[in-house]
Image (cartoon, rainbow, N blue to C red):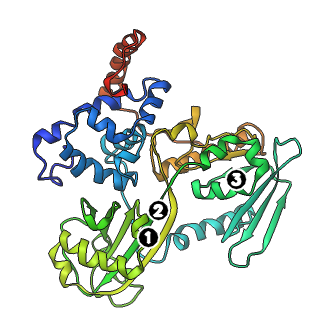
Amino acid sequence: MVATITNFTRLPIQDRLSIAGLLYAMLDLYRSDKIFQQYDDLDAQSLFVKLGISERLINEFLRPTLLVGLFKPPEELSAAVTMELLYYYALAHQDSFDVRWIKSKSIAEHLFAPLSRRLISRHHLQVLGGTLVKRVTMSSDSQRVSSVELKNVATQTVQVIDDVDAVVLAVGVKGLKALMAQSPELSKAAPELVSAASLGAIDVVSARLWLDRYVPIAYPANVFSRFESLKGAGGTFFMLDQLHQDAQQALWGDEQPQGSVVASDFYNASAIAAMSDQEIIDRLTHDLLPIAHPEFTNARVVDSEVRRYPGSVSLFSPGSFRKRPPLETSVESIVCAGDWVRMGDKEHGAKALCQERAYVCGLEAGNSLIRRKIVNGADHSHPVLPIRADEPQVVLGRALNKLVMDPIEALGLKLPWFNS
């Protein structure tokens, strides 16, 4: 709240101070596995209300923050994961990360294509783009994977890989649900994956606008808050021409730049996704951007692009933690990777919905297969860098809270927000 005091200028001080109780809950979160589970079973909105956080602070600060941080409103989010997000991003590591927008082409062209070429040339891997895993077949004793069936999306051809040593399931809910539906043997051998496939996912819509004039705006990165026309979605918009001032021509596909380039994302966007491309563009240019800055009213769209990503983002709903897939599954040759995976004793400080957590989990998935000698990696396990240590006052606060609360709970007393 202190760091964003210039961004939320209309919030009275008494509303800002009402967030203090949440700081205590953050100290209490990791007191034990049982306590963490209790916070996970509670939705964030209920916790906010029971902690005495003002309605105005919830609606004007926490709700829009969560809609663009965990992509859902607080009543649909686990209180535990909500606090992990707020602690990791807002308290402990504000200066540890930043957003980078690629100015030309796509992520696939800039990142994944050169990575694929490197894996092929240096490590002799086969990289199959545009291919889905359709089915995983188990060995006769249901202890290992025997084969994996693949399907090329463009040609609809099917390929089977036999003699599989190991599988890393780096998929979200949508992919896991489809895979388990076609893999009855795997479903029986790994019921925890069936449970994970029952969780929810979130729709995302992305739009980009090329305008005929430059629109000067105070901040290049912005959040839409409390707009009825969002239909319950969270929204952001980024002024790419301000973020890439030295690369205007690249933003315009090497054509002559005409004006601002705006990238906008919508989260929890099922209602937005059901609209046509033109309706989404009109909503941005008529209902959203002009309210954020009046000069958008005079700008004309000369080109646009809309993309939909249904079920593409993990939903950390109340009570979802115990259902999330584990790093190591009941099938010794199958491991899981992704931001929603429970990492057990390999848990990392990068929390909630973030690329760093997904990346670290991928490293730990590979390390697990090497460590247990399921694949022959010799000494090629990958080191995982820890995040920086918690600040001394946080460590002391957690220790004092545990010292006080454990004996109190041993007497049968609970914190008031855990009482139904």
Left or right for 10, reference 67: left
| Residue 358 vs residue 378, the one in the foreground | 358
Q: Please state which amino acid type lies under the numbered disc 1.
A: Ala
- Element marked by disc 2: strand
Where in the figure is residue 82, as x and y percent of width and height? 38, 42
Q: Please state which amino acid type lies under the numbered disc 2.
A: Asp
Residue for point 33% across, 37% down = 46
Q: How far apart are marks 3 and 1 (CA)?
A: 26 Å
The residue that disc 3 covers is 180
Q: How far apart are marks 2 and 1 (CA)?
A: 8 Å
Residue for point 54% across, 74% down = 109
Residue for point 86% across, 47% down = 139
- Element marked by disc 3: helix
Q: Please state which amino acid type lies under the numbered disc 3.
A: Met
Does the CB distance between marks 2 and 1 fall below 8 Å? Answer: yes
Decide: is 419 above or below 131.
above
Q: Which mark is residue 203?
A: 2
Q: Is tag 2's residue or tag 1's residue first in the polypeptide sequence?
A: 2
| Residue 138 vs residue 263, the one in the foreground | 138
The residue that disc 1 covers is 273
Q: Is tag 3's residue or tag 1's residue first in the polypeptide sequence?
A: 3
Q: Distance between the residues labelled 2 and 3?
A: 21 Å
